[in-house]
Amino acid sequence: MPAAVAALKSSGQTLVILGSGELVRSLMADGLIDEYVLPIHPLTLGAGRRLFPDAGARCALELTGALTTTTGVIITTYRARGGR
């Protein structure tokens, strides 16, 4: 999968992943994600799967934008600064 994504990226296309934490984690490990758009919802659910687990690939992120919707959702945008 990473080789196919790398080939698509080299074509200059914008690629978007919606709702697949497993795919995000695998591409993050290969340094193939340039930008993360993460909505933060103002509610507590208790448990769930973490997008960024304690063990695994690491990536330094730089906040490049944030906005708050009328419902209180904060939409943040981060750019990957390289490294793993």
Image (cartoon, rainbow, N blue to C red):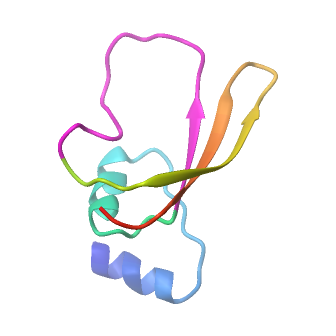
Stretch of the chain drawn in magenta: 35-55
Residue at image coords 36%, 56%: 59
Q: State the residue at coordinates (39%, 76%).
A: 5
The quadrant of the rendering that contains the C terminus is bottom left
Total residue callouts: 0
Q: For residue 42: magenta?
A: yes
20 relative to 75 in the view: left or right: left
Task: From the top left corner, tell me how far across and down residue 76 is, in percent.
Answer: 63, 41
Residue 32: x percent and y percent?
39, 70
Q: With respect to residue 63, does 17 lie above or below?
A: below
Residue situated furthest right in the rendering:
70
Q: Is residue 63 left or right of residue 52?
A: right
Image spot of residue 24 (x, y percent): 37, 54
Give the overall secondary structure of the magenta segment: loop
Location of residue 70 with respect to 25 vertically, above or below:
above
Q: Residue furthest bottom?
A: 11
- Location of the N terminus by quadrant is bottom left
Q: Nearer the viewer, residue 22 or 33?
A: 33
81 and 27: which is toward the camera: 81
Check residue 73 for magenta coloring.
no
Q: What residue is shown at x 55% (from left), y 53% (from top)?
A: 62
Query: 45 or 30, which lies in front?
Result: 30
Spot occupied by residue 66 in the image (x, y as percentages of width and height): 70, 40
Q: Name the residue located 59 percent from the left edge and 80 percent from the top edge.
A: 13
Residue 36 vs residue 45: left or right? right
